[in-house]
Image (spheres, grey):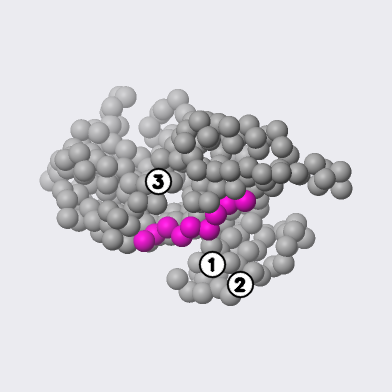
Amino acid sequence: MWSLLMMNFAFYEEDAGYAGTGLYTNTIMKELRNWRTTFIIDEAGPLIEGDKIMGIKTDKHDLIRASKYVFATGVWASKYLPMLNLPIRIIIKRIIRVRINHAVLDVFYYLYNYYMRPEGVLRSPNEDALPTRKYMGRPRHL
Amino acid sequence: MIFYYDMIIVGAGSTGSTIAYYLANEGFRVLVIDKRGVAGSMTAYSTGIVRSFYANEDVAKMTYYTHNFFMNFEKESGVNVFTKTGLLIIGKATPIRNVFDMLHGIDAKCEVTK
């Protein structure tokens, strides 16, 4: 109770909000079609000789080479980093297993242990920990 | 057969596509490659929360830039991907005031009240 009484200050950021990440990424990739950018769907793995990346091996498109390589693999970095032999360690702080119903696209805000949908549905893996009502709106298909 | 590009980006999520966007803008010939397609993995499950309220100054500067990027994205692309909701944080005076002072220093639009 005392800790709640200490919460006596408010910060407000008027312009904050949320971005539709799937829509954003698809918009960017669609735009890139007009430029000198190619997109392929394929398995990609680095071909390494010594300490240099010599190219990207793929399943369907043979070997592809470039002047520079960027690995923007997000959570799959744990798969690529050992191959690249870089002095970067991935430290797993917490593993959360979530059952996802693919009929409804959920998003997950791990910081506070919530599933969160910007449209208004809020759920928590640990329902008891949820300080507010379970559902704040109706889910909709995206 | 071997193909050549200026840049190869592995990963067509929000990060990979944004890097490709900036590189292509600079005139580089870019290839993006992803096993699962565009936004086929964790990007689709991201909350996409856009705010400047971060306690670390380096992170706050990055997110402030990102924030403006999303606010102006529709002007550039014709597609609105950003929904403004506002953000309210309630907490103890000192840490909030510290973050506010730091954000004020980087021109982030925010306010505090008792």
Q: Which residues are magenta?
A: B80-88
In the image, is residue B1 above or below residue B78? above
Left or right of A117: which side holds B29? Answer: left
Using the rendered image, report if marks 2 and 1 lie on a common chain.
Answer: yes
Q: Which residue lies under the disc numbered 1?
A: A119
A131 or B32, which is in the foreground?
A131
Instruction: List x then y, in percent, for residue B55.
Output: 59, 35
Q: Nearer the viewer, residue A10 or A23?
A: A10
Amino acid type of disc 3? Asn
Callout 3: SS: helix
Secondary structure state at the residue bearing disc 2: loop
3 and 1 marks in contact (CB < 8 Å): no
Badge 1 amino acid: Glu
Left or right of A130: which side holds A14? left
Residue ID for mark 2: A137
On the rendered structure, is B35 left or right of A106? Answer: left
Residue B68's disc number:
3
Q: Position of residue B70 (x, y in %)?
A: 39, 51
Image position, residue A110 (x, y; %)? 60, 50
